[in-house]
Amino acid sequence: MQMVTTVTTKGQVVIPQHLRDALGLHPSQKVLFDRKGETLVLKKVPTVKTMRGFITAKKKVSARNFDAAIKQAVLIKHHKKQHDNS
């Protein structure tokens, strides 16, 4: 299903409610934009709670830095996947 929305002067767009519901997106949740030519793909970034146990650390990570470590691991995995598909 295609939807048209407007980009604001701040570069913001509204994700329609039914799409937010379908993806389980909540206020303040992080999303990832992936550019594929002239297309932007929006992906839900997993939360710490849902990622627990999926990523193993090579070194100990403090609870304070855990969220940043997960984001970094997701970006590294995404970057590697993009290069593998090239």
Image: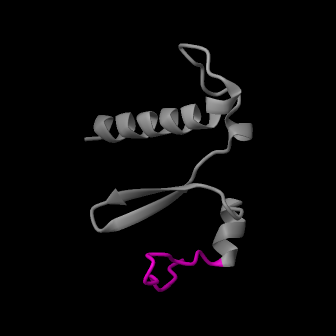
What is the span of residues highlighted in magenta in the rendered image? 1-16
Where, by quadrant of the figure, is residue 40 drawn?
bottom left
| Residue drawn at point x = 54 percent, y = 77 percent | 1
Q: Is residue 2 magenta?
A: yes
Residue 8: where, in percent of width, then height? Answer: 46, 83
| Residue drawn at point x = 31 percent, y = 34 percent | 84
Residue 41: where, in percent of width, then height? Answer: 44, 61
Q: Does the magenta stretch include residue 19?
A: no
Q: In this view, does 13 lie above or below 78?
A: below
Report the predominant secondary structure element of the magenta stretch: loop
Q: What colouring method underlies this structural image?
A: one colour
Pick the residue in front: 67 or 82: 67
Pick the residue in front: 15 or 10: 10
Pick the residue in front: 49 or 18: 49
Report the number of discs: 0
| Residue drawn at point x = 72 percent, y = 68 percent | 21
Q: Is residue 81 above or below residue 22?
A: above
Where, by quadrant of the figure, is residue 81 drawn?
top left
- The answer to whether residue 86 is left or right of residue 69 is left
Q: Where the C terminus falls, by quadrant?
A: top left
Residue 31: where, in percent of width, then height? Answer: 55, 56
Q: Is residue 49 above or below residue 59?
A: below
Q: In this view, does 38 lie above or below 43?
A: below
- The answer to whether residue 45 is left or right of residue 73 is right
